Amino acid sequence: MPLTLTPGTLLRERTTLRLGGPALVEAVVSCAAGLDQLAGLLPGLGGRPLALGAGSNLLASDGPHALVLVRAANTSAPQLLPQPDGTTLVRAGAGLRLPRLLGLAQRLGLTGLEGLTGVPGSLGGSVAMNAGSYGLELGSVLSRVRIWTPQGGLMWREAEDCAFGYRSFAPNLGPDAAQDFWLIWEVELALNADAPAAIRERMEAVYARKKASQPVTAKSAGCVFKNPQGASAGKLLDEAGMRGKRLGGMCFSPVHANFLVNMDKGTSAQALELLDLGRMAVRRRFGVDLETEVVVLQ
């Protein structure tokens, strides 16, 4: 079906932290016709629309949320568009999971994404957060992105017309649309050719490095605090005594202090209290105010 509406979807079922209460409704869109249907229905659904990818960067409270979760489910195989300069544009739907895309690129001998090995999100969500790892940010290989708004429909935006920052992306739709809801629908990435075996070797090295220093298999939302200028949030939290700090079923990972982990039936209240404890500990020790990287829905 082009569009599926499901009332009362629990955010804990849509986030990697496995936390969060019910939204008003979830809208899952599989094709452009579904977007047209959604444009007419959104005003009557009664909540604020929220674009949702794989939920790998969300911390949602346990109570009800006046939200309409909008998920892109366009997950068909990417298109390959060879370019005269030797690069290949890979056009893929926003609903495609990043690990699947990386696996496909490796098999096809397309390099440029290896640093994102182990990032669990969807392609659309990864662009929206300008996901990065080990010196690579997704914005550095983005050619253009297709954005949907209820008012304007689908439109392509060139990468140079968008704004990229540390874990941030803005399509710059203009001052009149600055506060409007937008959804990433398709993405084009510019990748180069390389031997599949060499790409696989780099991916394996990145994953081994992450596995040794991050809780990659735990129920987490990745790094919860942004790195302050010239410093590491994880190191600050570690030196402030927060590594392994536990409250109920939630803890700061004993592997990496900047990862909040749901150990055993944790609650959002416990997670939010731990974030506050971490902020206060770092502020007392170093005089630094940490800013959340994870998106908090309360």
Image (cartoon, rainbow, N blue to C red):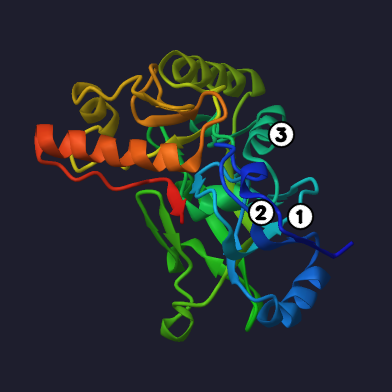
Specify the quadrant of the image occupied by residue 281. Answer: top left
Q: Residues within 10 Å of mark 3 (few under 14, many from 20)?
A: some
Q: Which residue is mark 2?
A: 94
**Observer-nearest residue: 100 or 282?**
282
The mark closer to the camera, 3 or 1, is 1
- Residue 177 position within the rendered picture, expressed as x and y whole percent measured from the top left: 49, 81
Q: Residues within 10 Å of mark 2 (few under 14, many from 20)?
A: many
Q: Earlier in the sequence, mark 2 or mark 3?
A: 2
Q: Earlier in the sequence, mark 1 or mark 2?
A: 1
**C-beta proximity under 8 Å, tags 1 and 2:** yes
Q: Which mark is residue 298?
A: none
Location of residue 182 with respect to 274 vertically, above or below = below
Residue 66 seen:
yes
**C-beta proximity under 8 Å, tags 2 and 3:** no
Location of residue 98 with respect to 91 vertically, above or below = above
Residue 85 seen:
no
Which residue sits furthest bottom?
Answer: 176
The mark closer to the camera, 2 or 3, is 2
Q: Which mark is residue 104?
A: 3
